[in-house]
Amino acid sequence: MKTETTDKRFALARRICSSVACLALGGCLLFSAFGARLSVEPAGVRTIFVGKPAIAGQPIPAGDGEGFNRDAAHVGASIKYTITLPTIGAYVFSARVSSPAYGAKFHTEFDGTNLTGSLAVPNSGGWTNWNTVASRSFRLTAGPHLMRVVFDSNMKGLGAAGSFDVFNVTPIIWPKPIHWTAAAPSPVKRFEGYARSRNGKLFTFGGYNSLIHPYAINTDGSIYDPATNNWASLGQMPVAPTHAGLAQDPEKGILYFVGGLQGAFPGVATTEVWSYDMNDNAWTPMPSLPLPLAAGDAVLVNGQLHYFAGIGSANRSTNVPVHYVLQLGQTDWHTAAAFPTPRDHISAVALNGKIYVFGGEIGHDTYHMQQTEADVYDPATDKWSRLADMPLSKSHTESSTFVTNGKIIIAGGQIDNYESTNTILEYDPVGNTWALLGNLPGVLQGTMLQRIGNQLVLTNGYDGTYMKTGTWIANWPG
């Protein structure tokens, strides 16, 4: 990893070379912190660094031990390694990167073939703030391969593609194929709405239904029965149509909507809390939050309703570390241990008496810096602990995250630059490990996915261009 001193030396090299050095066809010579001269060819994709031989499953320094700095990582440049894979099988490529802006992209080739697809360098908020980005899975044979990291585009307004610290080529279990079948479409578009399942049916609520400003909202709910492939109306709802925390009592069939944004975009944060009886389609007001809050999440554990993270009423880009708890049956919320790394659009679930929280973003409207962070909260000790990072930084998976067979599923979501992903991740809390379960039928964020019986039921969301009404069903691959 680079130190502050290393960054200063690279900055000096950049000033000597001038900004022209980072243009796609620049012909300047760059000097790294360790004194090696990097020759930039005049045209095409140019190899400007050759790394030491590497082995899959072990960290690969993106440079000569101190990282590959922003001065050298720019569009048109590439770095290459000879990497040895111990066995034939499936692998995932990942990179630890930093960037103060959006727009940079890169890909990785093995033996001349782009196997990772385009990877976005997320806005991490600065050169010394690091995020990990991971590729889709790919298959390779055992033995040596030529791995080339190619920088495809620079950050917006800056002549660099980011700063790169460490690469990894990690063997994984090849995901099982998921065969999706189209079903009856949702009666309305719902993006960033709410969804949970009960008694073999999918309940959906709220969400945006138009990308035309001011982004019209839904104030109703629908229920889908996969056994009959039919949708029905649940009528109007009194809760905030988007950005509320949603907790579920699976035994009693009660949903809890906490806070959220009232009205069309951009909306106004609210203190309102409502319970919804999934058995009787009935709404009941509950004690209000101490402050207007939105874009956090809520979880019910041991008869206590927790709400944490998100944004307040000041603006949509300032994240708050709040953590409030309401004992059901009482009237007052009290504070608990502050939420670590304040962020919004997290996903949270209850499992074995603890609260697990994944991903999210920092800065909402202004920065939307996607996060890989995962945390667990233990109510018995009132403490948060850090878990293994997600293999992909993403947010907007609130209604496509659920627990099944003791593991946690997180599907789709928003990645950098407002783009969507189709990855379905599986987290095992016993081993604190991640796996790629499979893929959605297309890229979707703010979508709704739940397991109902032995099936996955998917509906609505946003693919980066259009809000969707499509519904898809697949057999559970586990």
Image: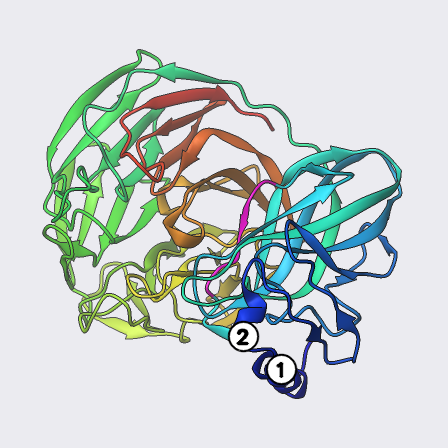
Q: Please name whichever residue, 155 or 437, is drawn nearer the observer in this view of the structure.
A: 155
Q: Residue at x 64, y 49 (%)?
A: 44
- Mark 1 touches mark 2? (CB < 8 Å): yes
Label 2 sits on a secondary structure element that is strand
Disc 1 marks a residue whose amino acid type is Asp
Residue 173 pos. (x, y %):
72, 36
Let me know if residue 118 is in the magenta part.
Answer: yes
Secondary structure mostly seen in magenta is: loop
Residue 350 vertical position relative to residue 191 in the rendered view, above or below: below
Residue 127's label in the rendered image is 2
Q: Earlier in the sequence, mark 1 or mark 2?
A: 1
28 vs 185, left or right, is right
Residue 439 pos. (x, y %):
53, 32
Image quadrant containing the C terminus = top right
Magenta region, residue range: 117-123
Q: Which residue is mark 1?
A: 7
Label 1 sits on a secondary structure element that is helix
